[in-house]
Amino acid sequence: MKYFKIILSIVALALLVYNVTMINFSNVSDKTSIIAIIGVIACICALLLLAILHLSQKIEKKVKRRK
């Protein structure tokens, strides 16, 4: 699970960087820019979900140690 989270994080970061480079800042309402913005938002959501998963696993380990 540890390596799976790391690989997903790297993929999400790579897609985030790629989508940011695809945004045309002079014309944000362009079709490709809107798709890139949606991709950036999706990557941020994926990274947040991975962070929540990581924190929940840390909490689970601490709870198991106390028992």
Image (cartoon, rainbow, N blue to C red):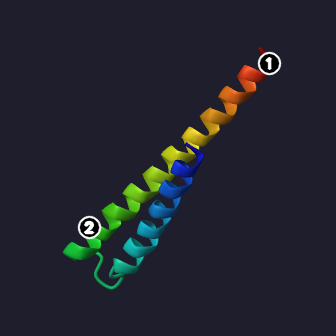
| Residue 10 percent location from the top left of the image | 52, 62
Residue 29 in view here: no
- Alpha carbon separation for disc pair 1 and 2: 47 Å
Q: Is residue 2 above or below residue 32?
A: above
Mark 1 residue crowding within 10 angstroms, few (<14) / some (14–19) / many (20+): few
Q: Amino acid at mark 2?
A: Ile
Q: Nearer the viewer, residue 28 or 17?
A: 17
**Which mark, by number, is residue 35?**
2
**Which mark, by number, is residue 58?**
none
CB-based contact (under 8 Å), mark 1 and mark 2: no
Mark 2 residue crowding within 10 angstroms, few (<14) / some (14–19) / many (20+): some
Q: Is residue 67 above or below residue 61?
A: above
The residue tagged 1 is 66
Q: Amino acid at mark 1?
A: Arg
Residue found at x 46% / y 56%: 44
Q: Quadrant of residue 20?
A: bottom left
Name the residue at the right extreme. Answer: 66
| Residue 38 percent location from the top left of the image | 31, 61
Q: Nearer the viewer, residue 39 or 58?
A: 58
* Badge 1 element: helix
Name the residue at the left extreme. Answer: 31
